[in-house]
Amino acid sequence: MTGDLDLARMRRDRHRKVVDALDAQGLAAAVLLGQPAVAYAVGARAPAADAARAAQQRMIAIVTADGDAPHLYTAFPEGVPPELPADHVHDALPMEWPEGATALLEALPDGPIALDEYTMPLHAALRGREITDATAILGPCKVAKTADELECIRRAQSINEQAMLTVEPLVAPGLHGSELSGVFLRRIFELGANANTVDPIWQVMPPRVADGPHSITGDVVFPTPTMGERFAAGDVIWVDTGIDYEGYASDFGCTFVVGGPESRHRDQAARWREIVDRCLDVLKPGATGGDLVRAASANEVRRPWLPHLYLAHGIGTNSAEMPLIGTDLGEEFDDALVLAPGMVLVFEPVVWDDGNAGFRAEEILAVTDDGYEHLSARDGGPRG
Amino acid sequence: MAEGLTRALDEMARQDVDVLVLGREGNARFVSGATRLWLAGTRPFAPGCVVVRETGAVHLMSTTDFGVPDEIPPARLYAMSWNPVNIVGAVAAIPGVSGAQRIGVDGLTPLFEQQLTAMLPNAQLADGEAVMRAARRVKSAVEVERIRTAISVAEDALGAAVEALRTGVREVELKGVFEERMCRLGTTTPAFEGAFCVVDSDLSVRRVASNRVIVAGDLVAMSAGVLLDGWEGSLARTLPCGAPTAEHRHRLSRWLAAWPPVVERCRAGARVGDLRATAGASVYGVGLGAEALEDSAALEPGMVVQLELEALGFLGADTLLVGDGGVEVLTAFPYEAAGE
């Protein structure tokens, strides 16, 4: 973790982008209730929490088009960026109740507003105001990362990868996934993670889809939550974890084989490598999502990823964000998505060999001026 | 039928809501009993679960029946999607949804509002969170047992953190020790990232653990919790690293003197806003995670609440079951270090 990182510069650059986007679309302000959106626009932190608690103690940001510093409403003063003027930092407003919603309404400038999400009391309070979905503002700001943002993702991923090196030697018959979670969670905090953001997944894959659990699409079921199943020799385990570093997510996926991989597991991993390498051959500015979909699918009987997920997704203050490639948003969407420098892609194709389970890993790349660079290691396994 | 669903259907009838479209995981779990992947933080609204009053059926966004109780057959599962048109289409296709007059939602985004009103132009949107809050508030005996079990896990895990509270340990490492122990006890989801924070002489209690190295003589405020099958067990204590000093004993005795009167006031009939009026006191509902309580609410028998008091740089919190008379304190972790 030696790369250059200037958090104040990162916050300044992001705020400028949001202000410019508001100005360009003739909006007076962005009102942000989602914690990843507040993290992006302001750089403020709150402790990670279960969704219910997070909603009750949510931070709120108002970013105005005049370029003034954002206003932040928070219960966590230690998470406020140091450069934010004191008169722009306010006590938390409870959006679960009409009083809080009304107080927020009174703090808004006149004019059309971009909003990311409503609570129902806020929905009632804002009736009559001109509201657009803030995704249209934040999406284009977030999609191309600055060098500081890329460094945050690189560091988040590095912490995640190092923690996994501690976990890997422990994988053995008789072990519970929850025990691996314990070792993993302890290690990420020692290594400097700000938070864990997803319940670590250690899913024992069935040899055949038909072996269950039941799939409503007929495709491989993934991910399922960790429920304490014991590992057995020869089990194929798909791993998926994610942590937070300075507001940015990691995304680590790999395949473990309990007792060590055999040739069929290595063959599956080699096919996975070929799929990603075909994508990397076309990955550069100007290429489209559709180009990546076609590269990944070339010579394959079917699209080599989970149809309810994606071939690749972006990552940033959300663990999955634009660009999304190979989703049910459809071919036209993929073809219209033009890659540009600073965009980040987490490739997660799947090789499934019904009868012998399959291989899944993840690899993170940033689009550069003339190609790409890795933000993750290139070792998804098979491990174990 | 799951007990939670019965209560939700009753409350839908009372509030005249035909269909609930739920995005909040605690709400979905309450009506379905399903375990889906846990994620930290707020999530923008998406229709993860639908309850239809006319059929009494729960429908879940899930590509598998893994973690889904048998009462919900695969035909009532619908696939997740990145395309709002597909998601809203799947919801609208659920029997009983297209004819609904009042649809309760527990959140919205401007985009989903647009999609829902376009797909279901005759429906009026109502506050589904208010329905769920009312259905969830008073706990059954079974639910109280689940909370007790979760508390015992949280207390065991906090004990591990207290054991690790020695000179040289960093605040964030205590958070890791707590979570590792929690996982060994069988649950991998914290209720929140624990606070393990040294209280300085300004007496303000931080809630985000830092890299600070703890040394003997430090007083450490610890607040942590777990979710066990979704049910929250959490508590807070403030303990010294090493032997307590005279100053620590003084602060502890002042806090211990202030605490019982606050607990005593948590009786059936007490107004939540009045309880919150005590300086440093906070109150919230405990169930499938933290449950919001409005100031105007009155405590009722069967409610479970977390009562916290931060005073004089001392943080303590217990979970209380409101009874017909007084309260039962469900947490049992000692307030001071062993051997004092």
Image (tube, rainbow, N blue to C red):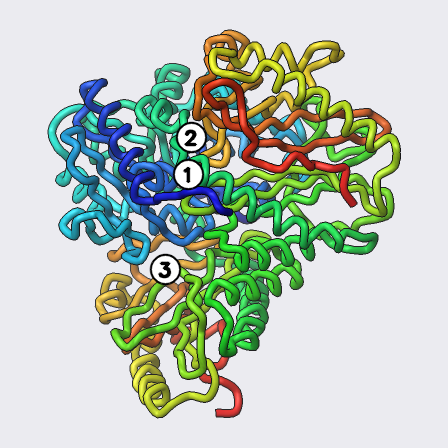
Observer-nearest residue: A50 or B329? A50
For disc 2, the marked residue is B18
Q: Using the rendered image of the protein, determine whether residue B124 is visible from the camera's viewpoint.
A: no
Front tag of 3 and 2:
3
Whole-percent x, y for residue A80 in the image: 28, 51
Whole-percent x, y for residue B182 in the image: 60, 62
Marks 1/2 in contact by CB < 8 Å: the verdict is yes
Whole-percent x, y for residue A27 in the image: 19, 23
Whole-percent x, y for residue B259 in the image: 33, 79
Chain for mark 2? B
Image height check: is B122 above or below B164? Answer: above
Q: Using the rendered image of the protein, determine whether residue A74 is visible from the camera's viewpoint.
A: yes
- C-alpha distance separating marks 1 and 2: 7 Å
Q: Amino acid at mark 3?
A: Tyr
Marks 3/1 in contact by CB < 8 Å: the verdict is no
Marks 3/2 in contact by CB < 8 Å: the verdict is no
For disc 3, the marked residue is B284
For disc 1, the marked residue is B12
| Residue at figure coordinates x 20%, y 50% from the top left | A89
Chain for mark 1? B
